[in-house]
Image (cartoon, rainbow, N blue to C red):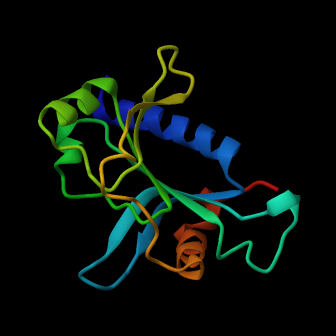
Amino acid sequence: MSRSDITAILSSLVEKRLNNRVAYWASEVSFDKGTQNWRRIDYVGFKPYTPNYAVEPVSVELGRFECYEVKSCLADFESGHGLTFYGDLNYLVTTVELAETLRVSHRLPRNIDQVLVPSKKGDKLRPLYDMTGNGSPSYRHRPASEMLYAMIEADGQRTRWKM
């Protein structure tokens, strides 16, 4: 399979996962545009904090952001693009083979929660490696307003609301 085919399959599985887990998501979300610190995240999802299914004043600020970086091959991983994790939960999405190569060579990013790979049937993502116990916690450093604005700015065609 080609690199673009693998990326398309992994991206489709991320979108399926986001549709089932969050209220809002966007792809190709940029941060710090126009600066030397410009970064783009493949997918960012947001789920508001709604105790007892009620929207409260803190629902946005206490909401959960999930960031997903999709890497189809080692060249993609080493490209210098991506590997930006600004969320409360952060995931590297790749093939089993690349995940194993990165693990063996001690190159798995330290600021992620899990490495996700396609299931054996190829119908969903499953965790291959759980990194939450690695001593380097992933947590958001940016305010919810900045994260949401970046998601909205990404492009209305690629954003999804689910209520």
Q: Residue furthest bottom?
A: 35
Q: Position of residue 20 (x, y in %)?
A: 69, 41
**The C terminus lies in which quarter of the figure?**
bottom right
- Residue drawn at x 73%, y 77% is 58
- Residue drawn at x 37%, y 31% is 6
Left-right relation of 53 to 145: right
Quadrant in the picture for residue 137:
bottom left
Quadrant in the picture for residue 26:
bottom right
Please name whichever residue, 118 or 40, is drawn nearer the observer in this view of the structure.
118
**The N terminus lies in which quarter of the figure?**
top left
Left-right relation of 47 to 122: right
Quadrant in the picture for residue 62:
bottom right
- Residue drawn at x 47%, y 78% is 142
Q: Position of residue 43 (x, y in %)?
A: 49, 55
Q: Position of residue 141 (x, y in %)?
A: 43, 75
Image position of 140 with respect to 112: above or below: below
Left-right relation of 127 to 72: right
Q: Position of residue 55 (x, y in %)?
A: 84, 69
Please name whichever residue, 138 or 48, is drawn nearer the observer in this view of the structure.
138
Left-right relation of 65 to 97: right
Please name whichever residue, 157 or 136, is drawn nearer the observer in this view of the structure.
136
- Residue drawn at x 41%, y 48% is 113
